[in-house]
Structures are given as structure tokens and as C-alpha cells.
Image (cartoon, rainbow, N blue to C red):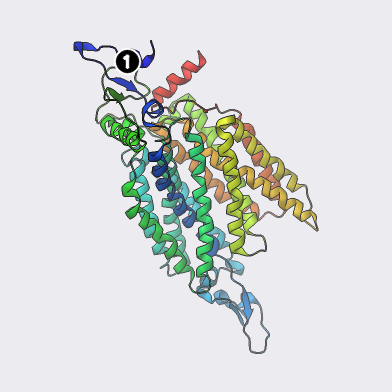
């Protein structure tokens, strides 16, 4: 007799016992793993990644250094640094001082470091926000509620940034924007993938990152359209309004995660979402059906009910468990190394002496084949082998790039090494979202992802500091980072076709059963 048939056997008092299954089982057996409902929900939720791309990458265009022309009547201009923000010795900014923050706030010569400082401040805000909203998403706010809050804050802070009267006000508002923007992708990813069945979750998770790349490409188009008619302030307004529109027109049609409902002991709400999924997919959930957490044994016949006692946890709970503590420490280091390489190589591509708008579009499109290849191979080879392979691929080619002289035709060979390096690390960087999410149970998933996201933001802060070290040294550091990260992945367990556990106790029991 199967487990399901056994659960259909009679219960106390002569009543038929209702079937108690996990959400993964409910999706696989009844509601559907990835049908029309999940597709619609996935597209709506994942579109938030476009918003994160706009808020993160807008600095490329808002903080660019415009060209300068000599406006002296006699055609003789002095030192460009002699006159501050507007240019010195007869030099003037092409497009005027309002064309960028560099021109308006005078971020040149001795003040040039402030451009990099703003970028570091933004990612510092992302790092703080990832931890805060990672916890809130696992606790009372939920996945949908957290996404709603961060998108609203994004829109408000982005518009306020356009009103910055000086550099330090601008930097402060970029910090606040980063505080909310750093959690948009995190909340969106978890909310988009948790209602997806186990056999489709990997491919769906990898597909979320197409939206981020599309957002970068769209940003380049918007910036190009505004380049001749507006200032950097208008660019911030235009890139912030979509966040407010998303909150008002998209999120009302998005469902909360059934997994979050279940760990909050709101089984009726979780079951309602599962029934909605089934209905949307043209399927039906039996009446003698209820959901259970994965730490509930078959002998526990009491349904999960609404209660003040919840199965949620915090990052403290992650460290209390030897299993999750080891996983978290490794994930933090691996994510930090991957981020240093990914953002570092991205900055190297952007700094090529080519058309800025075209470079950004090409850079975003170059990542898409990495997402496609990973999505196709993810369920064939597993998370662990793919993560190892892509990190080592990037590390090997970056190391090779450090050995190639940058002069003459060999510069093309180094550029090719960089392209292969960013291809491999783009695949790794996004694969780590899926891998990390599957390494931790629902009760602490966003808290753990928030912690690893903080590590990624720290890597993003360090990346510009590596890039300025010259031509060969950055490639060498990127190569070492990729190789070390690849070897560290060897220490993590495979999660392919493994249950997506709900609670810490369920994870521990599952690990024990695998050792038997």
C-alpha cells in the first residue's frame, strides 16, 4: 500500500482521514508543476527584475563623464581642472552641466573619487536592505508584502533623487534607493519560484534573470532617448515611475506564496492558493485533501491551523543548525567571489572606448546565452556540477587573460578571455540564486538568501576597487576568485530533484534519511 493510500485509511471516530501531502506533492500530483497559472504568475512577479535593473544600472548614464569642448573665443583653453564643475580654462560640458551628476556636481580631477563612492554607497544600501527585507519576507510581511514595500520605496526614493540639491544629498538618496532595490530581485525570485513544482523549478528560476538583462537593455534605450533633450534628473524620474506603476497595476493580481502561508500556520490560505493554481491549470484538487509541513509525521493527524505559533525562523536559526550553518558560510563566500568577478568584468566591458549605449546593450545581450545554456543543462547535470563548471570556466579564462599582454593584436585575445569569463560567471551568478534557495527550508529561505545577497553586494563594492589596479592584475584576481569559488562548490550538496523543505526540522530529518 502506498503512503497516499495509507493516509486514506479510516481515522478516529469512524471518519475518513483526509490526505495530507506536502506542497511539492500537491503540485506534482494535482495542481500542476508549471501550467497557465504559474506562467502568468511567473511573468508578473519576475517583471520586478526590470525595476531592479533600472535602479541599479542608471548610475552608468547618470554619472557618466560627458565630453568637453573648448569654448574660448581665441580657441585657446587652459587646464580643464582649473574651473571646477563646469570645466576650467574655457572648457565647457557638451550638453551642459545638467547632462550628468559629474558635470553638475563637478566630480572631476580631485573629486573624481566621488563617482566610485556613490556606487559603493548604493551597494552598501543594497547589502543592508537585503538582510532586513530577507528577514521580513520570512516573517510577518511575507514575500508579496515585502515586494510591495521595496518597490514602493524604490519609486519614492528614485524620484526624490532627481531633486538632490547637492552631491551629499544625492549620495544619501542613492543609499536609501539601494536599501530597497537590493531586495527587489530577492523577493521576486522567491515569490516567482515557490509555487512551481520541483521538476520545473530550476528552469523557471534561471528564466527570471532574462528580465534583469532586458531591463538593462531597456535602460540603455531610455537613456539614449533622453540624452539630447533632458538631464540626469529626468532620467531618474523616468526610471522610477515604473516601480510605482508596478505596485498599483501588477501586484494586486499576484498571489502570496502558498509555502509562506503554510509555515505561518495558515493552512486554509495555502490550500486556497493550491486550488487556485489547479483551477488556473484546468485541473482539480480532491476534496479529501489537506497540506502538511515536511516535519509532520504521518502519525500526526491534526490539520495545520492558524496559530500564533509559526514555523518561521531567522538567521539565528540557520546558525544553530550544523547543517545550515556550514551551507550558509560556504554560500556567503562563493556568492562574494562570484559577485567580484561578475561586476568586475562588467565594469571592464563598460569601460571600453566605444559608444556607451551600444556597449551596455551588447553587454546585457551577451549574458542571455549563459542563462539559456544553464536552464537547458540545469536539470540534466544538476546544480552542483554546473556551478563548478561555470565558475572554473570563468576562472581559467580570466587567469589566461592575465598572462596576455595588452598591446597590439593581443588585446583582442584578452578581450575574448574577458567575454568567456563573463559568460561563465553570469551563468554562475544567477545559478547561485536557485542553488541557495534550494539549500535552505522555507522557514529561513529568504533570511539565508538575504545573507548571501549581502555578500554579493559586498563583492559589488569591491569590484570597482579591483578594476582600477591596472590591466593584468584585475584579470589575475578574477581568475583566482573563480577557481577558488569553483572548488568551494565541491563542498555543497546536490539539490537536484530533492524536496524543497519547509522547516528546519524537516531539513534535518531529510538529511538523516539520506545518511541511512
* Residue at 24%, 30% in the rendered image: 306
Residue 41 in view (yes/no): yes
x then y, percent, for residue 73: 64, 89
The answer to whether 147 is drawn above or below residue 483 in the figure is below
Q: Residue furthest front?
A: 282
Would you name the residue on which mark 1 appears? Answer: 7
Task: Answer yes or no: is residue 101 visible.
Answer: no
- Residue count near mark 1 (Cα–Cα under 10 Å), binned few <14, some 14–19, many ≥20: some
Residue 467, x across and y down, in percent: 65, 53
The residue sitting at 36% across, 33% down in the picture is 259
Q: Quadrant of the N terminus?
A: top left
Locate residue 267: give its quadrant.
top left
Residue drawn at (59%, 30%) of the image: 381
Task: Give left or right: position of 178 versus 254.
Answer: right
Q: Nearer the viewer, residue 278 or 338?
A: 278
Q: Nearer the viewer, residue 397 or 136?
A: 397
| Above or below 441: residue 46 | below
Q: How many numbered marks does the figure carry?
A: 1
For label 1, the SS is helix
- Residue nearest the viewer, comparing 376 with 124: 376
Residue 71 in the figure: left or right of residue 105: right
Residue 319 x %, y % = 45, 30
151 versus 427 height, above or below: below
Residue 404 at x, y = what percent? 78, 49
Amino acid at each position: 500500500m502506498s503512503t497516499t493510500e495509507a493516509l486514506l485509511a479510516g481515522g478516529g471516530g469512524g471518519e475518513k482521514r483526509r490526505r495530507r501531502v506536502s506542497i511539492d506533492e500537491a503540485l506534482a500530483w494535482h495542481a500542476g508543476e508549471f501550467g497557465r497559472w504559474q506562467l502568468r504568475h511567473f511573468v508578473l512577479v519576475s517583471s520586478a527584475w526590470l525595476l531592479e535593473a533600472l535602479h541599479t544600472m542608471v548610475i552608468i548614464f547618470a554619472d557618466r563623464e560627458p565630453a568637453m569642448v573648448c569654448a574660448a573665443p581665441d580657441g585657446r583653453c587652459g587646464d580643464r581642472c582649473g574651473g571646477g564643475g563646469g570645466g576650467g580654462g574655457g572648457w565647457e560640458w557638451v550638453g551642459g552641466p545638467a547632462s550628468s551628476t559629474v558635470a553638475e556636481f563637478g566630480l572631476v580631477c580631485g573629486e573624481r573619487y566621488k563617482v566610485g563612492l556613490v556606487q559603493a554607497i548604493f551597494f552598501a544600501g543594497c547589502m543592508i536592505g537585503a538582510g532586513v527585507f530577507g528577514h521580513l519576507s520570512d516573517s510577518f510581511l511575507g514575500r508579496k508584502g515585502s515586494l510591495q514595500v521595496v518597490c514602493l520605496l524604490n519609486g519614492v526614493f528614485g524620484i526624490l533623487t532627481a531633486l538632490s540639491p547637492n552631491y551629499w544629498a544625492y549620495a544619501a538618496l542613492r543609499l536609501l534607493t539601494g536599501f530597497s532595490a537590493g531586495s527587489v530581485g530577492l523577493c521576486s525570485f522567491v515569490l516567482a519560484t515557490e509555487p512551481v513544482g520541483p521538476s520545473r523549478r530550476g528552469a523557471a528560476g534561471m528564466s527570471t534573470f532574462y528580465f534583469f538583462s532586458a531591463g538593462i537593455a531597456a535602460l540603455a534605450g531610455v537613456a539614449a532617448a533622453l540624452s539630447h533633450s533632458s538631464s540626469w534628473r529626468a532620467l531618474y524620474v523616468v526610471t522610477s515611475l515604473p516601480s510605482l506603476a508596478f505596485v498599483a497595476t501588477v501586484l494586486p493580481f499576484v498571489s502570496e506564496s502558498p509555502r509562506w502561508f503554510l509555515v505561518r500556520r495558515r493552512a486554509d490560505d495555502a490550500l486556497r492558493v493550491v486550488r487556485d493554481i489547479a483551477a488556473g491549470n484546468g485541473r482539480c484538487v480532491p476534496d479529501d485533501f489537506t497540506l502538511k509541513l515536511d516535519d509532520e509525521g504521518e502519525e500526526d493527524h491534526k490539520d495545520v491551523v492558524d496559530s500564533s505559533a509559526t514555523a518561521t525562523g531567522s538567521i539565528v536559526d540557520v546558525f544553530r543548525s550544523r547543517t545550515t550553518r556550514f551551507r550558509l558560510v560556504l554560500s556567503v563566500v562563493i556568492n562574494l567571489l562570484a559577485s567580484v568577478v561578475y561586476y568586475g568584468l562588467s565594469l571592464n566591458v563598460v569601460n571600453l572606448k566605444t559608444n556607451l549605449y551600444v556597449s551596455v546593450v551588447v553587454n546585457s545581450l551577451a549574458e542571455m546565452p549563459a542563462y539559456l545554456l544553464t536552464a537547458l543543462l540545469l536539470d540534466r547535470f544538476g546544480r552542483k556540477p554546473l556551478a563548478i563548471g561555470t565558475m572554473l570556466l570563468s576562472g581559467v579564462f580570466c587567469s589566461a587573460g592575465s598572462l596576455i599582454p595588452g598591446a597590439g593584436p593581443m588585446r583582442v585575445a584578452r578581450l575574448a578571455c574577458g567575454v568567456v569569463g563573463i559568460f561563465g560567471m553570469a551563468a554562475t551568478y544567477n545559478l547561485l540564486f536557485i542553488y541557495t534557495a534550494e539549500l535552505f527550508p522555507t522557514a529561513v529561505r529568504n533570511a539565508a538568501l538575504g545573507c548571501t545577497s549581502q555578500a554579493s553586494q559586498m563583492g559589488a563594492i569591491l569590484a570597482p576597487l579591483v578594476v582600477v589596479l591596472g590591466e593584468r592584475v584585475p584579470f589575475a584576481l578574477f581568475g583566482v576568485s573563480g577557481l577558488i569559488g569553483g572548488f568551494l562548490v565541491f563542498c555543497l550538496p546536490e539539490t537536484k530533484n530533492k524536496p524543497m523543505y519547509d522547516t528546519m526540522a524537516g531539513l534535518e530529518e531529510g538529511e538523516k534519511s539520506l545518511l541511512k
